[in-house]
Image: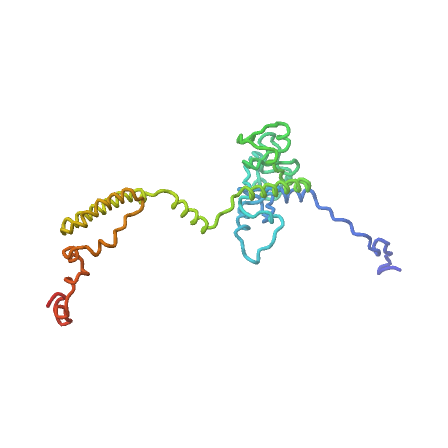
């Protein structure tokens, strides 16, 4: 039982055993989490934002993801909980003065230090490379190491002095247990915001409410009805005096004036006053017989003007 060349195979070469579990390189995992965007897989560059679960994103990638509403849009689990730009917080990061970036190794003949990071903790000075736990405050977005928050216990931010609570501290790139705790807080926070919002009334109901308020409130038109009635009566007096009406009309005027002062509504003229008007008063209006023309006086289409007889 030999192969070509007289070689004798061994058992492990012929019999396939159980597959070994592939282990992820820790250094590669840390670099992917702390140096690259979770959504676009591009290098992190300012402005950098973080979600309520502690994942890092480029703000441009989040905006493009939210604006893309096409049917071909791929469902990404890393950003499925982000529904609007309000669900992410822009981070206030502190630059590392010792960071050289890609400038130090342009030729590729130098050693790249994986542990060096672009940002550091402003209190302790630890580099944000994944070796140490980092947190950010949801109110202001300032980033600190967990060691700084534990050693210097305060209720205000170390950088901008904004007050915060323990529930508003979010761990960046935490473990599975940390993510579960942050997920519960996120769901509770969103439920409270939904319950706190007042239900919007329909437009039809708003118009009905406004009309009811206007009817109940006393307007200037109702308050001045008495004055308007007296003005109308004074106009009647003037017209009757000009037309020289009968004595019955003059006697009815003061009574109507008294009624108008006592009445709250607008004054209505009696029906008898229309029949008792004089001919001189009626001749003022165009509906009078004197204003009407006969067939002989009416204009013809041959005439030059409408008033030519």
In this rendering, the count of numbered labels is: 0
State left or right for residue 241 relative to residue 129: left
Q: Position of residue 163 (x, y in %)?
A: 55, 31
Position above or below: 154 against 52: above
Front residue (pair 6, 23)? 23
Looking at the rendered image, the quarter that the C terminus falls into is bottom left
The residue drawn where x is 12% and y is 68% is 297
State left or right for residue 219 relative to residue 101: left
Report which quarter residue 218 is drawn in. top left
Position above or below: 38 against 72: above
Front residue (pair 155, 214)? 214
Colouring style: rainbow
Is residue 273 something that shows in the picture?
Answer: yes
Report which quarter residue 255 is drawn in. top left
Front residue (pair 46, 178)? 178
Q: Position of residue 228 (x, y in %)?
A: 26, 45
The residue drawn where x is 53% and y is 30% is 161
- Outermost residue toward the bottom in this view: 302
Front residue (pair 4, 133)? 133
Looking at the rendered image, the quarter that the N terminus falls into is bottom right
Q: Position of residue 238 (x, y in %)?
A: 17, 47
State left or right for residue 241 relative to residue 20: left
The residue drawn where x is 38% and y is 46% is 215
Q: Position of residue 293 (x, y in %)?
A: 15, 66
The residue drawn where x is 20% and y is 45% is 234
Position above or below: 13 against 229: below
- Outermost residue toward the left in this view: 309
Is residue 54 something that shows in the picture?
Answer: no
- Outermost residue toward the right in this view: 1
């Amino acid at each position: 039982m030999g192969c070509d060349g007289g070689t004798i195979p061994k058992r492990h070469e012929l019999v396939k055993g159980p597959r070994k579990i592939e282990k992820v390189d820790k250094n590669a995992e840390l670099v992917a989490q702390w140096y690259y965007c979770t959504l676009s897989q591009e290098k992190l560059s300012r402005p950098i934002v973080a979600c309520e679960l502690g994942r890092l994103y480029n703000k441009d990638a989040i905006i493009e993801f939210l604006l893309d509403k096409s049917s071909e849009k791929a469902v990404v689990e890393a950003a499925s909980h982000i529904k609007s730009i309000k669900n992410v917080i822009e981070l206030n990061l502190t630059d590392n003065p010792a960071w050289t970036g890609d400038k130090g190794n342009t030729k590729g003949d130098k050693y790249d230090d994986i542990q060096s990071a672009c940002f550091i903790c402003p209190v302790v000075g630890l580099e944000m490379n994944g070796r140490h736990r980092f947190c950010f405050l949801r109110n202001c977005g300032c980033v600190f190491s967990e060691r700084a928050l534990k050693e210097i216990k305060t209720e205000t931010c170390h950088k901008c002095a904004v007050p915060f609570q323990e529930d508003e501290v979010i761990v960046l790139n935490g473990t599975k247990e940390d993510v579960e705790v942050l997920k519960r807080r996120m769901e509770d926070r969103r439920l409270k915001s939904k319950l706190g919002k007042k239900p919007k009334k329909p437009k039809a109901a708003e118009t009905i409410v406004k009309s009811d308020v206007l009817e109940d409130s006393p307007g200037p038109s109702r308050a001045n009805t008495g004055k308007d009635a007296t003005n109308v009566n004074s106009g009647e007096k003037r017209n009757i005096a000009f037309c020289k009406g009968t004595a019955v009309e003059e006697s009815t005027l003061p009574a109507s004036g008294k009624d108008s002062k006592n009445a709250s509504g607008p004054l209505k003229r009696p029906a008898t006053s229309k029949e008792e008007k004089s001919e001189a008063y009626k001749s003022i209006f165009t509906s009078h017989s004197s204003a009407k023309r006969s067939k002989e006086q009416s204009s013809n289409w041959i005439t030059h003007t409408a008033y030519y007889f």
